Image (cartoon, grey):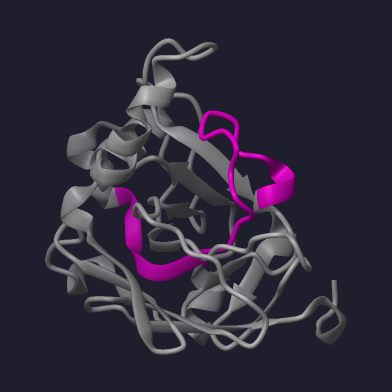
C-alpha cells in the first residue's frame, strides 16, 4: 500500500455484493425461491473487518485442505468527505479517489447473508498499491478489470457492467448510514470466482490503477 493510500484509506471496508450484471442475472432464479421471493431492491452489503486488511505483495493464508479460497477483484472507492443522505448528483463530490481491492472469501452460501467466517479471516482484504485521485480518473464506469492466477487470465469484466454506478451506491447507502472520510467502498466482484491454492500468485489489474499482487501460502507458513 502506498504511503498516500495508507494515510487516506483508514476507515471501514464496506463491500457490495451482486453489483455486476452477469453475476446478478445468474443468481436471479435463487431469489424467486423461499425465503427471498424477489431480488434485492437495495444494495446488499458486508463488512471486511480491520483484521482483514492486507497490502500489495502480502501473503494470504489458505484456510486448509478441503476448503476453497476465492479472490474477489474489485474497484475500491475511497471516501474523501463524510456522506450522509447525499443525492446521486452530489455523491462523487464525496469521493477522494480510487484503488484496487482483492477481497478474498470462502465460497458464499447466501448472497443475502454474506457470512462473517467466509469474509473476515485475517488478511482477506488486500488494498493498493496505488491511490488515484478522483480528478485523475476520467470515467470510473468504463474500466477493464482482470484477475490473473500465475499469469493466466481467469476473470475479466468492465465496470461498465455495474448494476449500480458509484453515485447511486453512495446515495442509497448514505440514506441509512454515514460514510466517513477514509472509508473504502468495495464496489463488487464479477461473475466467475475461481479457487486458488498455496503457492499461487494472484494479480488484479484495473485499467488506470495499476496491478495489485498477492501470494497464497499454506496455513503453517503464515500467521493466523
Image coords of residue 187 (percent x, y) = 38, 51
Q: Residue at x 12, y 67 (%)?
A: 138
Q: Locate the C terminus and report the quarter of the image it occupies.
A: bottom right
Whether residue 118 sits left or right of residue 202 in the image: it is right
In this rendered view, identify the residue nearer to me: 140 or 219. Answer: 219
Which residues make up the magenta segment? 94-118
Whether residue 201 sits left or right of residue 191 in the image: it is right
Q: Is residue 95 above or below residue 24?
A: below
Q: Residue at x 60, y 57 (%)?
A: 105
Q: Is residue 72 above or below residue 2?
A: above
For the view shown, which residue lies furthest in the front direction? Answer: 66
Q: Residue at x 31, y 73 (%)?
A: 146
Image coords of residue 46 (percent x, y) = 57, 41
Q: Is residue 115 above or below residue 197?
A: above
Image quadrant where residue 221 sits: bottom right
Whether residue 54 sits left or right of residue 213 in the image: it is right
Amino acid at each position: 500500500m502506498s504511503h498516500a493510500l495508507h494515510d487516506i484509506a483508514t476507515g471501514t471496508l464496506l463491500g457490495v455484493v451482486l453489483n455486476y450484471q452477469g453475476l446478478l442475472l445468474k443468481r436471479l432464479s435463487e431469489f424467486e425461491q423461499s425465503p427471498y421471493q424477489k431480488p434485492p431492491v437495495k444494495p446488499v452489503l458486508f463488512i471486511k473487518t480491520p483484521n482483514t486488511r492486507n497490502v500489495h505483495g502480502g501473503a494470504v493464508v489458505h484456510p486448509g485442505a478441503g476448503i476453497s479460497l476465492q479472490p474477489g477483484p474489485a474497484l475500491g472507492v475511497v471516501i474523501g468527505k463524510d456522506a450522509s443522505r447525499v443525492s446521486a448528483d452530489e455523491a462523487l463530490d464525496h469521493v477522494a479517489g480510487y484503488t484496487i481491492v482483492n477481497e478474498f472469501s470462502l465460497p458464499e452460501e447466501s448472497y443475502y447473508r454474506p457470512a462473517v467466517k467466509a469474509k473476515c479471516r485475517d488478511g482477506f482484504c488486500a488494498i493498493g498499491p496505488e491511490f488515484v485521485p478522483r480528478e485523475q480518473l476520467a470515467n470510473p464506469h468504463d474500466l477493464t478489470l482482470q484477475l490473473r492466477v500465475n499469469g493466466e487470465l481467469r476473470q475479466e469484466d468492465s465496470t461498465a457492467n455495474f448494476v449500480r454506478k458509484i453515485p447511486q451506491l453512495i446515495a442509497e447507502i448514505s440514506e441509512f448510514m454515514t460514510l466517513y472520510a477514509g472509508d473504502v467502498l468495495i464496489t463488487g466482484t464479477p461473475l466467475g470466482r475461481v479457487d486458488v491454492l498455496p503457492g499461487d500468485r494472484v494479480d488484479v489489474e484495473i485499467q488506470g490503477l495499476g496491478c495489485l499482487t498477492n501470494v497464497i501460502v499454506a496455513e503453517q507458513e503464515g500467521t493466523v
